Image (spheres, helix red, strand yellow):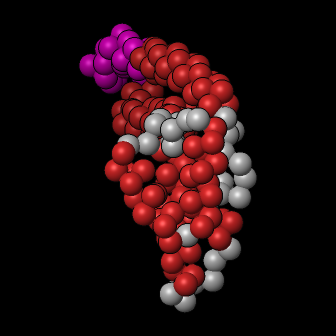
């Protein structure tokens, strides 16, 4: 995500958030096109494999005396080849489509307007921690609502701060970024 929400930096302007949201929408359209190309490629590979099996392999297996070595090799390696097509297709889809899609979905969700419930939780935290209240005031001064990514960042910051206060862990409070 090119746009990061941190408690130590000024909150981004609404124009920056809208530009990031527009870029994420463009990225989603490109990812959908990439997914369609990937699906077509895999279907062509499976169709070619099935055609080879139906036109060449099965007729040769019907009469194994014609080319016994080829029949034995095909009969032995066919399940492995099917398995490899499945494994490489699934791994390729996961790497090229699923991981970027999950990152993009997280990015799009972080750029949505926060719900009133999460804003109320942030207001409650702002009563205890001055840094949270300051961030809320800076967002209000920009004249825009709090975003989901900002509320998650602030809640994460409060959680880390509370853990540090209780002595559960030594944490650099500046680590809370979304």
116 sits left or right of 102 in the view: left
The residue sitting at 56% across, 75% down in the picture is 161
Q: Is residue 58 magenta?
A: yes
Q: Nearer the viewer, residue 42 or 81?
A: 42
Q: Nearer the viewer, residue 78 or 122?
A: 122
126 sits left or right of 53 in the view: right
The residue sitting at 61% across, 54% down in the picture is 135
**Given the current orientation, which residue lies at the most extreme left position?**
62
Q: Nearer the viewer, residue 60 or 165?
A: 165
Q: Is residue 38 magenta?
A: no
The residue sitting at 60% across, 44% down in the picture is 139
Res. 6 visible in picture: yes
- The dominant secondary structure in magenta is helix
**Residue 58: x and y, percent?**
31, 18
Against 9, is 58 above or below? above
**Given the current orientation, which residue lies at the most extreme bottom position?**
167
Residue 50 sits in quarter: top left
**Residue 76: x and y, percent?**
39, 38
**Residue 143: x and y, percent?**
58, 35
**Residue 95: x and y, percent?**
55, 38
Res. 106 visible in picture: no
Q: Nearer the viewer, residue 39 or 63?
A: 39
Quarter of the image that includes the N terminus: top right
- Image: magenta residue range: 46-68
The residue sitting at 43% across, 42% down in the picture is 114
Residue 70 sits in quarter: top left
């Amino acid at each position: 995500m090119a746009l990061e929400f941190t408690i130590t930096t000024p909150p981004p302007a609404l124009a920056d958030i809208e530009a990031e949201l527009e870029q994420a929408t463009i990225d989603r359209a490109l990812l959908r096109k990439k997914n369609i190309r990937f699906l077509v490629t895999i279907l062509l590979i499976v169709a070619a494999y099935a055609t080879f099996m139906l036109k060449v392999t099965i007729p040769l297996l019907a009469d194994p005396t014609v080319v016994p070595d080829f029949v034995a090799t095909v009969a032995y390696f066919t399940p492995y080849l099917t398995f490899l097509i499945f494994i490489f297709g699934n791994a390729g889809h996961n790497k090229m489509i699923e991981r970027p899609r999950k990152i993009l979905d997280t990015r799009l969700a972080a750029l949505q307007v926060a719900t009133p419930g999460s804003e109320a939780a942030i207001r409650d935290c702002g009563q205890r921690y001055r840094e949270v209240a300051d961030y809320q005031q800076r967002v209000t001064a920009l004249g825009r609502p709090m975003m989901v990514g900002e509320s998650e960042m602030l809640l994460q910051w409060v959680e880390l701060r509370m853990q540090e206060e209780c002595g559960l862990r030594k944490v650099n409070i500046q680590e809370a970024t979304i």
